[in-house]
Image (cartoon, grey):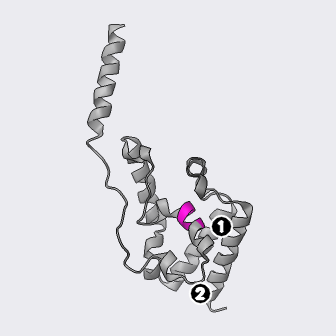
Amino acid sequence: MRALWISAGILVIVLVVIQFFQSPKNISHGSDGNDMLEVISSLTPQQKDMIRNSCYDCHSNHTVYPWYGHIAPVSWMLSSHIREGKEHLNLSEWASLSDRKRISALQEMGEVVAKGQMPLKGYARLHKKARLTADQKDQLLTWMDTETKRLMGE
């Protein structure tokens, strides 16, 4: 019984100490004019909200952190997911991409949305606003297809 109390005490101390080792937060203040939602005029306000709610926490410089996102080790895991998401696609840098890269990004976005791979199921479970209905998916997929054709000059 004593060993259990000692173990619990050590665990509490470790949990308190690791709180001092936080990852930097992915919060950008202001804009440099490259953000997808600012530079693409063909998006409706509703589509912008869908993209912001479903994509921006991991694929932009503007993460909105839940309360548990400030508690280690969960904060470390979130930081890792955000870093990986931004390495793959950072929508805050949209205007700096070439048309070829934008076309590729739109096609890949369309594929993962159509297959239900994005937003991630675990993320959508915790963030109700991130969940896309079939109609919302159709709206976004139609817009992505139209925007891809526009960029291709069709």
The amino acid type of the residue labelled 1 equals: Glu
Reply yes or no: does residue 122 show up in magenta. Answer: no
Which residues are the magenta region?
50-54
Residue at image x 32%, y 51%? Answer: 23
| Residue located 62% across and 82% down the image | 147
Image spot of residue 68 (x, y percent): 43, 43
- Outermost residue, front side: 45
Of residue 8 and residue 87, the one placed in the foreground of this image is 8
Q: Which image quadrant: the C terminus?
A: bottom right
User: The disc labelled 2 sits on which kind of residue?
Assistant: Leu
Q: What element carries label 2?
A: helix
**In which quadrant of the rendered image does the N terminus lie?**
top left
Residue 15 quadrant: top left
Q: Which of 103 and 59 is in front in this view?
A: 59
Residues at marks 1 and 2, CA–CA distance in whole angstroms:
18 Å
Q: Is 31 situated above or below 19?
A: below
Dot 1: element: helix
Q: Residue 151 carries which label?
A: 2
Q: Earlier in the sequence, mark 1 or mark 2?
A: 1
Q: Give residue 111's mark.
A: 1
